[in-house]
Amino acid sequence: MVKFRSEWRDLAEWSAYGIPLTTASNAAAKLYDATLDQMLYYYNHPQFGGVGETLQKMMGEDPDFIAGNMLRHSFEMFVSNNDNARKRFDKYVDGLEWEKLNEWEKGHIRGAQYLYKEDLIGAMDHYGALCAQYPHDLHSFNLGYVLGLVTGHFSYMRDIPQSIIQHYKPHMAHYGLIHGKLCFGHAEMSEYPEALKCGETALESFPLDSWAVHAMAHTYENQSQPKQEVEFLNRTLVNWSRGINFRQHIDWHHANSHIQLGEYEAALTIYDKNIAGCAVSGDVFPMSDASSFLMRMRIDGQKTGNREAKLAKLWSEQNHDFTSLFYDGHCALAAAMSNDSASLETLRENMSDFIAGDRQGWNKVVTSSYGLQLVDGMRAMCDGDFAGAAREFQACVPDVVRKIHGSKAQKSIFTLTYVDCAIKSEDRTLMCGAQEHLREMYEWNKVEQLPPLQQRLWDKMELEFAKG
């Protein structure tokens, strides 16, 4: 069986890679490596029990460890960015002696300050530049890379790993990791031969790389190749199923591919066994996967057994954070599926307050531009006004799928929902608009055919047009 890493870099090894950690504790330096490894590969190491526990152990070894503190604070503000996280960061920075910090440490503090302000574009650019200066700084690499995904700047997910890949050699611990990250960047930029090559290199280097498996799934999915995607995920299941904290998302890809192939029982089996249980944790990431899966089933004419009701209740507790329009859109979707008009109204009111309020940043920009239209479309769909929903979606979804948080595969649920409402409206003008949007999507992916589910929707519209 393939094993997880067991040897971690000490202070001397970090220094040899050009990373100036300031701590007297070799144990803290090694735990810093172990924390980053689990963050980047998306797994829970059996020796440490996951990112949270490893962070705690690291800080226990040296509470003053600046790199460790910045890892903790930046992660906390990236994930939640609430007042408590900002207060903790303020207190920490106020206690620092700035003149005693090295330039790399100052760079990480400045990056966290961008996150503090919710300036995700500024943070993305800053961490990308810091990574270029320190190519083995996997903390800045990870944040710059993920912020490219969060802000819809897919080119960053190609360009950041591509800019440092020459610094990683086959004997190095994270040689495969950089290729796996680059695989996903190439896939989202529709550069499929390059994506496949990088993904194969990554998995040959470290077969337990959950992100590389995920990137390969996107490569097949973006090319409208669900059969190849299912075969690949079945073949590699023995490895990626060990990535505890990311498995449900790969299962989501697996289940969606079965929907594409019309294998609905197989899709629901994966959902019930591996996705639904993660969603009830209240974490918005698996909740979004669960919601969009169920909507795909409904759009394809399948019964979901009221599975969305529990999700809608969970989402109703997440209608006030406004850290990502992607998640707020799924909150609205779950409410619409469950005919929960009260939750939709509350979400809209809270979103209006957020737009009118003092918070700034990338999500404020995209929510102000498209958020209310997206929620209004869901409200109309909930009320059975499919023409009204399609008109709202026609005005915002083409921009939503390009500009908000998420991959092409994740954001395609908004395209599918728009098309489904246009079909149910029986309005030919709206269906023509929906067909044009579908055409734009497969041209964006640089493929010559629609995925099977999208093709089934296209064929429904063609049948309506043929009625004369």
Image: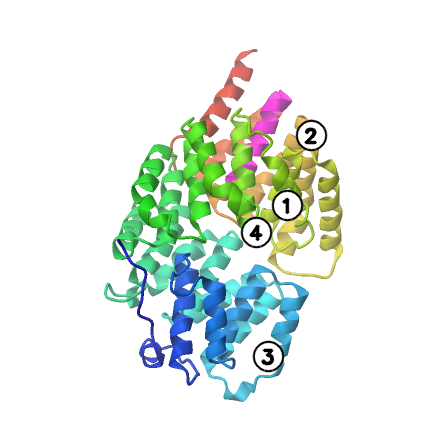
Residue at disc 4, secondary structure: loop
- Give neighbour class at mark 4: few <14, some 14-19, many 20+ (Cα, 10 Å): few
Q: Earlier in the sequence, mark 4 or mark 2?
A: 4
Q: Is residue 374 left or right of residue 189?
A: right
The nearer-to-camera label among 2 and 3 is 3
The local crowd at label 3, few if under 14, some if 14 to 19, many if 20 or more residues have their Cα within 10 Å, is some
Residue named by callout 2 = 388
Instruction: Give the number of marks.
Output: 4
> Where is 429 relative to 170, above or below?
above
Asked if disc 1 and disc 3 are in contact, CB closer than 8 Å, the reply is: no
Q: Please give the name of the residue rendered at 40% of the width and 44% of the height, measured from the top-left corner.
A: 218
The boundaries of the magenta stretch are 412-429
Q: Residue furthest top?
A: 468
Residue position for label 1: 314
Q: Looking at the picture, which amino acid does disc 2 mark?
A: Gly
State which tag comes first along the sequence, 4 or 3.
3
Look at mark 3 in the image and give the residue it sits on. Answer: 93
In front: mark 4 or mark 3? 4
Q: Which residue is mark 4?
A: 283
